[in-house]
Image (cartoon, helix red, strand yellow):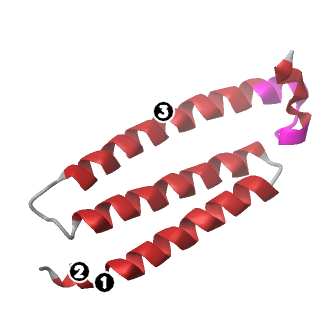
Amino acid sequence: MTPLSYHVQEYVLLAALLFSIGGLGFLIRRNVLIQLMCVEIMLNATNLLLVAFNRLYPSSMTGQVFAFFVIAVAAAEAAVGLAIILGFYRLRNSVHSDDADILRH
């Protein structure tokens, strides 16, 4: 056992705190850019959990591989999300999610 494996509960608590902050920020804030950053915080909390639990079993690298794929998906999500936000800003001159009713038509 590595010294880090005895302190996984601290990482779980930190990841839960980060995920809660991200979720609460996503639900409360109206700015789409802030909401996108909150989703990124939630994905980073997931990565923290994956890597922390991977430290319990250092012979298996599955947690770090999954974290790598989550990072790749987060990068693609940020690129597509920013493109949608830029297109929306050009249409409405606003980045508030309340003004996004034009996207339904």
Say if mark 3 contacts mark 2, CB within 8 Å.
no
Asked if residue 96 is among those painted magenta in the image, a careful observer would answer yes
- Taking the image as shown, residue 52 lies to the left or right of residue 92, namely left
Q: Position of residue 78 (x, y in %)?
A: 55, 38
Badge 3, how many Cα within 10 Å: few under 14, some, many 20+?
Answer: few
Circle 2: residue type: Leu
Task: Please identify the quarter of the rendering in which residue 100 is found.
Answer: top right
Determine whether 81 is above or below 38 in the image: above
Circle 1: residue type: His
> How far is mark 3 from mark 2, CA to CA?
31 Å
Q: Quadrant of the N terminus?
A: bottom left
- Taking the image as shown, residue 91 lies to the left or right of residue 37, namely right
Residue corresponding to mark 2: 4
Closer to us: mark 3 or mark 1?
1
> What secondary structure is the magenta-colored segment mainly?
helix
Determine whether 41 is above or below 56 in the image: above
* Residue under the point 21% across and 50% down: 62
* Residue under the point 56% across and 63% down: 19
For residue 7, the mark is: 1
Residue corresponding to mark 3: 76
